[in-house]
Image: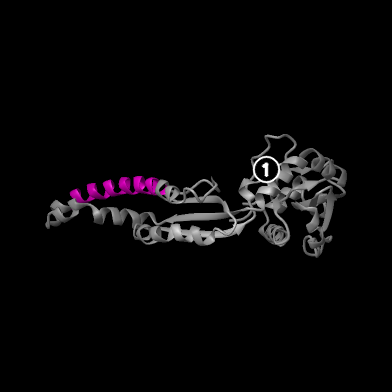
């Protein structure tokens, strides 16, 4: 589920600034078109060499009880989350970007200016890195039953099971329990195998959400233009993993959402979720 980042409001009334991302000032002219459908247009608020890409929004729609209800309403939330990513992707074509999380609000231009002054060095450092790096997501979806069946079939003791149904049943149940345990171990070891295969290419790796049983979902920070090399390393793993019920899917490139600094009211306020992947 998407989540708001930091809501900087001084009340539930009035107009605030919704900020999509930070970019280099030279890309300000790309901030054209609507912010959200039927609402105020995009603008670029420039501070020295930085541009905050934003639009005005009614604060009461994003804060308080109304805001909480909207964040649970997919009909309201979905188009806005999609537009959030569209704006960032557009700006990424003109400049490195520091993507902000869905729902980052400022109660005034002065509050935004204050943050740009305070965090200028950190934002500029991130943009410099972002000129050479991008994010991909790697998802491993595990068919648990297929994995357990593969482990059962590979157990040499299966071939020695007695033909008699009565004698076979209890022994087979024991082997199936062993296969269930083996599948869990295999799934964990396989994640380590995949991580080793990506060593030297992946600059950083983070989990995107708590995994389901045996599955995983990673954010990978890689050099720009590394798509072919990423595919080359994953390709020889795909078939044997699929035979055990684990299917890999790589998507990207994205702006480095999962590796961007967060700008909360305190430096430690970094407990937000990403919006894409």
Closer-to-camera residue (91/34): 91
User: Secondary structure under badge 1?
Assistant: loop
Please tell me in which quadrant of the rendered image residue 111 appears. top right
**For the C terminus, which image quadrant?**
bottom right
The magenta span reads 169-191
Closer-to-camera residue (171/178): 178
Is there any visible trace of residue 3 in the rendered image? no
State yes or no: residue 184 in magenta: yes
Secondary structure of the magenta portion, mostly?
helix
In this rendering, position of residue 90 left or right of residue 184: right
The residue that label 1 is drawn on is 261
State the residue at coordinates (30%, 56%): 149
Q: Is residue 12 above or below residue 249?
A: above
Q: Residue 181, image x and y in percent? A: 32, 45
Closer-to-camera residue (166/187): 187
Q: Residue 148, image x and y in percent? A: 32, 53
Closer-to-camera residue (234/114): 234
């Amino acid at each position: 589920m998407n989540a708001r980042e930091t809501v900087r409001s001084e009340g539930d009334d009035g107009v605030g600034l919704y900020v999509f991302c930070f970019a280099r000032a030279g890309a300000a002219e790309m901030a054209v078109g609507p912010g959200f459908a039927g609402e105020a247009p995009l603008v670029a608020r420039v501070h020295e060499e930085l541009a905050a890409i934003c639009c005005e929004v009614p604060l009461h729609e994003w804060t308080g009880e109304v805001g909480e209800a909207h964040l649970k309403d997919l009909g309201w939330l979905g188009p806005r989350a999609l537009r959030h990513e569209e704006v960032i992707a557009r700006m990424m074509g003109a400049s490195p970007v520091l993507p902000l999380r869905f729902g980052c609000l400022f109660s005034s231009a002065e509050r935004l200016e204050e943050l740009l002054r305070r965090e200028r060095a950190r934002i500029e450092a991130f943009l410099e890195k972002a000129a050479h790096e991008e994010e991909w997501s790697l998802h491993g979806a595990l068919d648990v039953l297929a994995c357990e069946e593969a482990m059962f079939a590979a157990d040499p003791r299966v071939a020695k099971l007695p033909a008699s149904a009565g004698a076979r049943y209890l022994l087979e149940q024991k082997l199936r329990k062993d296969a269930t345990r083996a599948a869990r171990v295999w799934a964990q070891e396989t994640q380590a195998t995949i991580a080793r295969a990506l060593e030297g290419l992946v600059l950083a790796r983070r989990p995107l959400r708590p995994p389901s049983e045996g599955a995983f979902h990673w954010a990978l920070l890689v050099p720009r233009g590394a798509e072919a090399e990423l595919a080359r390393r994953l390709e020889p793993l795909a078939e044997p993993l699929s035979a055990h019920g684990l299917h890999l899917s790589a998507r990207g490139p994205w702006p480095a959402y999962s590796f961007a600094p967060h700008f909360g009211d305190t430096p430690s306020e970094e407990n937000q979720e990403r919006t894409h992947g």
